[in-house]
Amino acid sequence: MNLLFLMTDQHRVDTLGCYGNPHVATPNLDRLAATGTRFDRFYTPTAICTPARASLLTGQAPFRHRLLANHERNVGYLEDLREDAFTFPAALAERDYQLGLIGKWHVGTHRNAASYGFEGPDLPGWHNPVDHPDYLAYLEERGLPPYRITEPVRGTTPNGNPGNLLAARLQQPVEATFEYYLATRAIEQLDKYAADGRPFFLATHFFGPHLPYLLPDAYYDLYDPELVDLPPSIAETFEGKPPVQRNYSAHWAFDTMPLDVTRKLIAVYWGYVTLVDEQIGRILARMDELGLTDDTAVFFTADHGEFTGAHRLHDKGPAMYEDIYRIPGIIRVPDQPPQVREEFVTLTDCTATLLELAGSDTRPATDSRSLLPLVRGEHPDWPGELLAEFHGHHFPYPQRMLRDERYKLVVNPESVNELYDLTADPHELSNRYEHPELASVRRRLMRRMYDLLRERGDNFYHWMTPMYDIGTSDYDPTLSSFEQKGPSPS
């Protein structure tokens, strides 16, 4: 079976019509969801680009593959996977798959997509590389104008400097946008693979809707800001929360901009989502024209979400809220029923799913579980909880998260822990970790997280052993024994 993998970057799940947004036009992704499986509880293993993408590539949790940070803000972590790391493209190549990746790579600095067998232009970095020779050649061949922006939107940082660029008007027609260029290159690759006749894996990784939102006027002004309901968590006070969250709010200069700017930024973000949806539609339409649809499994997801003002934050960071951990997840496999699934699944589970569809061994994808039983409409025994992790961005900041049907526990070793009742407090405004009425919930989740981390081999659990209520310890936390049992010397 052919495999088409469509991926966006920093994409809020609530911007899609198929996930309930009544305003944003996403007809192509809505159609994909209506003919496939839409996962309602689809999560990233970690809300940051490089580690999440490395988990997809390897089928391993970040603590295991150890590629823990984006190289642009790296603070001493590894910048490339180990040479002996298992990756799914190597397994697919053994099955004679053609391998293509068009778009964002961001899984290492010294090894690029070609190092893992993928065809396509080498497009490194975290945002649209608008000075890339292949993109410039694309513009020149078509007589399209070069990249130029106007009216940049920025806040003011705590030291009085201009803040990060959040949005700007792009002075190009849609055909010149990087998103249109990526879809064009993907269509060209599809044509090539269809002519060859061998099975293919083709990924198209869009850099958007990651900020800054750089869009032509038609998309920048597509949605009236009056349609935007501000996120309820914009009422965040950070009371009882880890102080790092308030620091990140200042870093992103949220309070230095009026709320009407936030509303406009969200409307522009919606425009970006629609632009990407249109390009995905072009790729899917070409697949139909080539007669490939009945032989191709299609995946759509993102590496993580985006705050867009939620919790008075932008981008992502050391705060394990649903806004950045819950992501879209759609899989359409030919001859399987359209449906919505409620199980907790992750981006990492895509790895074993791809491997199984290709007839490859799924076991080397250590932390991945094939989603095909769910896609087929089966009801297998499935975990009723989700584990996620974070290791830092601008600085090391380790976190672990466990969420179940109702509650979420976040362990922050250097700060206060967090516990949220997602039924009573769906926007995660009230940290109830210290509330006595939830003591039994806190104890249960802490012990469950502890057991899961030990089962995985995630050494984060060593800090938990003496510090939290995990019951009686069954090992020596000093990792060496100095006491000898037996009679005392006379």
Image (cartoon, helix red, strand yellow):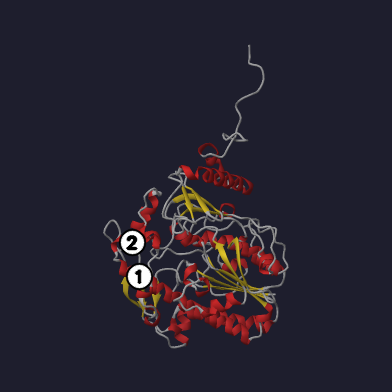
**Mark 1 vs mark 2: which is more N-terminal?**
2
Q: Nearer the viewer, residue 182 or 331?
A: 331
Is 148 located above or below residue 240 in the figure?
Answer: below
Query: Residue under circle 1?
Result: 263
Q: Disc 1 vs disc 2: Cβ atoms closer than 8 Å?
A: no
Residue 254, percent across and down?
33, 61
**Residue drawn at x 72%, y 62% as measured from the top left:** 361
Secondary-structure class at tag 2: helix
Q: Say which quadrant the C terminus sits in.
A: top right
Q: Can residue 132 be seen in this view?
A: no
Gap in angstroms between the C-alphas marked 1 and 2? 12 Å
Q: In which quarter of the image is residue 478?
A: top right
From the viewer's perspective, tell me whether residue 31 is left or right of residue 276: right
Q: Nearer the viewer, residue 213 or 310?
A: 310
* Label 1 vs label 2, nearer the camera: 1
**Residue drawn at x 29%, y 66% as measured from the top left:** 258
User: Label 2 amino acid?
Assistant: Phe
Residue 265, percent across and down?
36, 70
Residue 129, percent across and down?
45, 72
Q: Which of 411 and 471 is in front in this view?
A: 471
From the viewer's perspective, tell me whether residue 469 is left or right of residue 172: right
Which residue occupies the extreme top position in the image? Answer: 490
Badge 2: how crowded within 10 Å, few (<14), some, or many (20+)? many
Query: Residue under circle 2?
Result: 254
Q: Say which quadrant the N terminus sits in.
A: bottom right
